[in-house]
Image: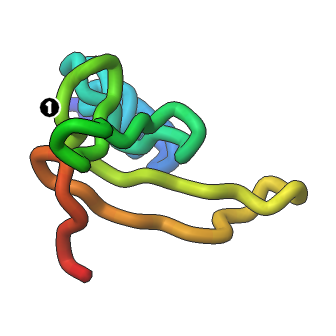
Amino acid sequence: MSVCAVPLDVVIASQTKMLASVNNPVRVAKQDIVISKKTGLRLYQGKPYTGDVVVYYPSGEIAKLSNYQSGLRHGF
């Protein structure tokens, strides 16, 4: 029996890519989210968004991370 060692960062990257490919990204930038004037829900690509919304500092570090479920703030 042989064992294939895969670096942890490769495993995490492939899992993240797999999750993000299910038509609903894991994280999107705040500028990609639209607030519906009619319902007040956060929309991504025209649908209520479920996932993380992230804001970055100019250096690339995360400034703010918010979670939404079905367009509403979650865990606040």
Up-down: is 64 above or below 30?
A: below
In the rendered image, which residue does mark 1 sit on? 1
Quarter of the image where one finds residue 62: bottom right
- Residue 29 position within the rendered picture, expressed as x and y whole percent measured from the top left: 55, 42
What's the residue at 36%, 53% (across, down)? 52
Q: Nearer the viewer, residue 28 or 70?
A: 70
Side of 21 relative to 31 (left or right): left
What's the residue at 14%, 53% (across, down)? 69
Q: Residue furthest bottom?
A: 76
What's the residue at 51%, 47% (across, down)? 9
Q: Residues within 10 Å of mark 1 (few under 14, many from 20)?
A: few
Color style of the picture: rainbow
- Residue 2 position within the rendered picture, expressed as x and y whole percent measured from the top left: 23, 31
Quarter of the image where one finds residue 36: top left
Q: Residue furthest right?
A: 59
Query: If the image is split into quadrants, where does the C terminus sit?
Result: bottom left
Side of 54 relative to 33 (left or right): right
Amino acid marked by disc 1:
Met
What's the residue at 46%, 39% (across, down)? 28
Up-down: is 27 above or below 61?
A: above
Secondary structure of the residue carrying numbered label 1: loop
Query: If the image is split into quadrants, where does the N terminus sit?
Result: top left
Q: Nearer the viewer, residue 33 or 1?
A: 33
- Residue 74 position within the rendered picture, expressed as x and y whole percent measured from the top left: 19, 68
- Residue 12 position within the rendered picture, expressed as x and y whole percent measured from the top left: 40, 45
Residue 4 can be seen in this image: no
Residue 22 can be seen in this image: yes
Q: Nearer the viewer, residue 20 or 68?
A: 68
Side of 76 relative to 6 (left or right): left
